[in-house]
Image (tube, coloured by chain):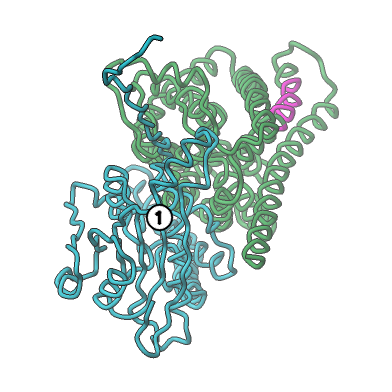
Chain colours: A green, B cyan
Amino acid sequence: MHGPISEVIQFIDLNAYTITFLFIVGFIGGLVSGFIGSGGAFVLTPGMMSLGVPGTVAVASNMCHKFPKALVGSIKRYKYGQVDIKLGLIMGVFAEIGVQVGIMLQKHILDKWGQAGSNLYVSIVFVMVLVIVGSFVMRDAVKMKQAGNESAPGTSLAKRLQQIELWPMVTLKTANLRISIWFLLPVAIATGMLAATIAVGGFIGVPGLMYIIGATSIVASATELVIAFVMGLGGTLIWAYYGMVDIRLVMIILAGSLFGVQLGAIGTTYVKDYMIKYVMATIMLIVAVSRFFAIPKYLNQLHLISLADNLENIMTKLSFAIMCFALLVGASIILASLFKARSQEKAAAVTS
Amino acid sequence: MQTPKGIVPAMHNETAAFPQDPQDHNQIDRQLLLERQKDRPFILVVTRNGHLSEHVMEYAVNVAHRLQYGILAVHVDTLPLFHDRGKRSKLFAAAMRESEALFNRKAHNKEVVVEHLGETGKIGGVVSRLCHAKKRIEFVVVDKGIRVQEVARQSPVPVFPVITTQSGQCSKTIVHNPKEKGVFAMSTTSRKRHVKNCFLFGALTSGLYAAVFVNQDAVMTYFTKGGAFALLPVATVFAVSYFHGNFTSAFWSALGIEASKKTAAQRVEADQPVKEGVVAPRPDARPRLQVNV
């Protein structure tokens, strides 16, 4: 692409339905992001597209709403002492490289197999990553809950990696660990690649920080917000350079999501460590199911299978509905545990 | 303990951090240590703030651990009759409880005994009174905000301030960011202030939104031009995140939904408890007379 190409883009007219939809999805997405460090974005892009927003504008506006949200969330969680800024910035810069690699890969697939092939690739990556990582995180969360553990003991892999003295080493005070940059690199690049592919890098970033780097889930999810900020700002500058950002959509989503992100961040101070993993894994697994229903459509478009039109339609709608459901489930777990813990704390304060 | 007329000691609670623990010590070690504790000398740590500075705590704990002393930590409320319907005193007491919890945790890790005391009145007077009432106070450590001369004039034992450099432990003291909400920072942030902030930032946010949406056409024309105009949407969302971010933060606080208070008090580094080496009795190697019959 050379220079601004805005003249070909159609921006939609806003109405009450559009505004309400974006505000509510923004709020719920923000709530989940504030809590687990990412999420919400995966519903917004298809959501905006279903409102008639062109794909590129939807992606650009989504990206542009992501970084201010991450900024507000990380500042809030920094106040609670949960953010490792150094780790976040290092990872963010490397993740930016991952984003570029991811975009190149996408372009390559687009050239080779066309739009449907690219969509199929995205969906398969979605399902694989979400199922593998999601079930691993879920297993860990259940184990921790059963053991009644409050803080993650740190996986054996992370401990082993931390012992390897490979120049240059970084000491991360908040995360309370010392590790070689060489081990941060693959996690960051994978985060960036996933962010470029499915718009939610955190599904790799947070588990990577927990199981490979060895941070607790509270620190990992808070630090992911810094990574999302760096990646989002970089991405937004590029999209805005091409004039793709619809500031009105961004501002409406932000109006809702900043309410959510504050509440999500407050929620992390009440819950135990495993709760973050639990919410994250739940969302990941439900989203995986949703994307699974999207695959037949692309297979059909590639003429690999034949599917009736109405069945394809139903599956597409079902896929989107399940995605919204994932977000709703996550948000309800967060709100329920926040208010439950709050009332317990109040009751304890009254009795003492 | 005598108190000046009209001034009542705020509270007196003694918490021995050490004896509550540990499974690792067997009964004999425990008894030995308890006996040693009985006539153990004390370090008097004095603060006039709600929260004792962390570096003072750490210094006191380290010295007490090395010298096998106990610590007597005193929070002195210098303005007990402050005219705010008891709000300051209440905050002071709450802050003191948090500070005590933190101190106990730190002391517990090094197995140092800490007693806590809440006092009111002038610092010099309190120190002098305590030194006379409680024997075996070896020296006094004062927190920031207390003039050493003021205490030294009335203290029968030496008085030390704990001064830190910018690059040194000072960074640890700013853990209690005064901007932090809640009682942890002894802040007087009230719901009223949140409501005020909520309205202020709410108005600013609405202004910003109104400006963008009223001039929608012009905004969309310029903001999507691309090139250097890319800075316009980015700058706008930064402004939104500042105004709307502050508004939403104040909004939840005004509704009373704030971070858990426990989290702040629990934020203590997870030091491993230092095991006190129990010295084995020296073998009696004196020559003995043996008689074989």
At 72% across and 32% down in the image, what residue appears? A286
User: As displayed, is residue A225 above or below residue B80?
Assistant: above
Chain bearing mark 1: B
At 66% across and 54% down in the image, what residue appears? A341
Q: Position of residue B110 (x, y in %)?
A: 38, 42
**Residue most extreme to the front:** B293
Quadrant in which the N terminus of chain B is drawn: bottom left
User: As displayed, is residue B41 above or below residue B192?
Assistant: above
Please state the total of marks drawn on the protein image: 1
Q: Position of residue B191 (x, y in %)?
A: 52, 74
Lateral position of residue A8 relative to residue A295, left or right: left
Instruction: Tell whether position B265 is magenta.
Output: no
Q: Amino acid at mark 1?
A: Val
Quadrant in which the C terminus of chain B is drawn: top left
Main secondary-structure element of the magenta-colored stretch: helix
Q: Nearer the viewer, residue A172 or A97?
A: A172
- Asked whether residue B62 is in view, the answer is yes
Lateral position of residue B69 relative to residue A232, left or right: left
At 40% across and 64% down in the image, what residue appears? B185
Q: Position of residue A301 (x, y in %)?
A: 71, 19
- Asked whether residue A5 is in view, the answer is no
State which region is magenta: A286-297
User: Would you name the residue on which mark 1 appears?
Assistant: B114
